[in-house]
Structure formats: C-alpha cells, structure tokens
Image (cartoon, grey):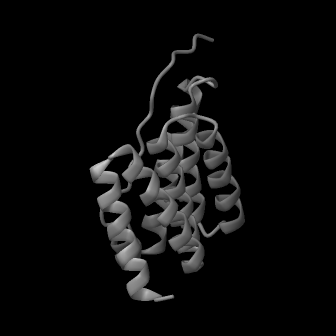
Amino acid sequence: MHRKVVSVLFCDVVGSTALGESTDSEALQAVLAEAAEWVERARATAADTDAESQVSLRRAQARLLARRRDHEGAKAVAQEALALADGTDDPALKAEARVALAEVFEVAGKQDEAVGALEQALELFERKEHVLGAAEARRRLAGLRAVSPS
C-alpha cells in the first residue's frame, strides 16, 4: 500500500445545529454516516506521523460521536486530539483541539467545561495572533455564557 503525507482540514458546518433541529432523524443520520465515511477515507490516506492530520481526524471523529450522542467516546477521542496537539509547538493546532473538546462538552450539556476549553483556546489563538480563530472562540464563548452564565 502506498501512503502519502497529506494535511486534512475539517471545519464546522455553519448551521449544523439548525440542521440537526430542522432535519428528521433519518436524514440527519444519513448526513452523519456520510461524514463518517469521509473521515475514514481521510484516515486511510493520512500519515501516522503527520500530527496535524491526526489531530484533524480526531477532531472530526469526536464531533461526529458527539452528534451521535456517544458522549464518552467523543470525549475520549477529543482528548486524544488534545494530547497529540499538545505534543506539538503549534498554538493554533492546540487551540483547535480545545475548540473540538468544547463542542463535545457543549453537546453533552457540560457548559462549564465547554467554557473552560474555549477560554484556553482563546488564549492560544491570541498568543498566535490568529485573528479569525480568536474571534470565533469569543463568539462561541459569548453564546455559551448567554445560555449559562457562571
């Protein structure tokens, strides 16, 4: 088998929460199944030594598991992504892993933990001067705080 080093970018689907609320269960499961297929395709081509790809794969998988209500599995995979990211010197990758963990916590109803992960992400984005990442982290934090002020 020939393997190539590739970087894989996974991003949030704008409006995914609304999609979940407005789509019937069967259609939503089909969307999640297709996304899982793409994660597996990416996993098959990603080099084991490419930290960015491995973190991205785990971020995507954690989000899928969270949406399927496998909260413990999602948390475990998000923590794998975090451990891999923390083994690098890339603040943005570390921040993105924390954003994924925050999403897992949020879907599981653990708002305080989600806020904590996003606060860490925000600090890392700001340290990297990653303007868009910091803005998104602030937006998510504001949304969480509006729902559950602590």
Q: Is residue 60 visible?
A: no
Determine the image quadrant of residue 114. Answer: bottom right
**Residue 5 pos. (x, y %):** 51, 18
In this view, 77 is above or below 70: above
Between residue 3 and residue 112, name the one nearer to us.
112
Q: Is residue 136 left or right of residue 104?
A: left
**In the image, what residue occupies the spot 48% across and 73% down?**
25
**Residue 147 pos. (x, y %):** 42, 87
The residue at the far front in this view is 127
In this view, 39 is above or below 31: above
Q: Is residue 97 visible?
A: yes
In this view, 111 is above or below 87: below
Determine the image quadrant of residue 108. Answer: bottom right
**In the image, what residue occupies the spot 38% across and 44% down?**
128
In this view, 116 is above or below 54: below
**Residue 95 pos. (x, y %):** 48, 51
> How many numbered markers are drawn?
0
**In the image, what residue occupies the spot 44% across and 44% down?**
92
Between residue 149 and residue 47, name the one nearer to us.
149
**Residue 6 pos. (x, y %):** 47, 23
Between residue 149 and residue 39, name the one nearer to us.
149
Determine the image quadrant of residue 23. Answer: bottom left
Q: Quadrant of the N terminus?
A: top right
